[in-house]
Amino acid sequence: MLLRVDIDQLVPTTLQKDKPDDFDLWPEHWQAWDVYLGCGTQWRYRAVPRGLQASITVCEGLDYQGVEVVMRRYRVPEARFDEVFSQLQVLEAETVAIRNSEAR
């Protein structure tokens, strides 16, 4: 489950790709991944006009004020804030690219 959303319910089975049952997560990345999952409600979107009556929704990224709250609530040590935030930005950039490519 990614971002606490059951993707199997969102994507028709005919369009789903095979996925591994497990994956490797390096120890130095687990805290950023945990924060990423905890930020599931911190995404910013905006509607972009497309023609006279239509629009598309574009993912802008994470609300960084909310991210900081999540990092503190998940007790990320102050000494690791910059490192975890940088790793989170990599996850964010990939997520934005994927979500916006699917929106078009």
Image (cartoon, rainbow, N blue to C red):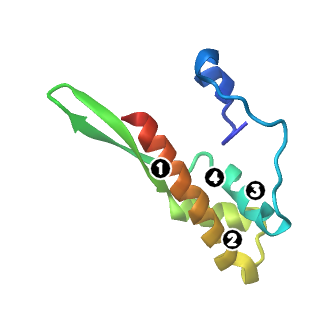
Q: Where does label 2 land, which residue?
A: 84
Q: First in sequence, mark 2 or 4: give its number.
A: 4
In terms of secondary structure, where does tag 4 sit? loop
Q: Where does label 4 land, which residue?
A: 39
Q: Amino acid at mark 2?
A: Val
Q: Residue at x 57, y 59 (%)?
A: 66
Would you identify the image quadrant in which residue 79 lies? bottom right
104 to the left or right of 62: left
Q: Where does label 3 land, which residue?
A: 34
Pair 3/4: label in front = 3
Q: Amino acid at mark 1?
A: Ala
Cβ atoms at labels 1 and 3 below 8 Å apart:
no
> Relative to 89, does residue 62 appear above or below in the rendering?
above
Label 2: how many Cα within 10 Å (few below 14, some 14–19, many 20+): many
- Work out how far the residue at label 1 is from the one at label 3, CA to CA, in angstroms: 20 Å
Cβ atoms at labels 1 and 2 below 8 Å apart:
no
Q: Position of residue 64 (x, y in %)?
A: 52, 64
The quarter of the rendered structure image containing the C terminus is top left
- Work out how far the residue at label 3 is from the one at label 2, CA to CA, in angstroms: 10 Å
Q: Where does label 1 land, which residue?
A: 97
Q: Nearer the viewer, residue 101 or 62?
A: 101
Q: Residue at x 59, y 24 (%)?
A: 10
Q: Residue at x 68, y 76 (%)?
A: 83
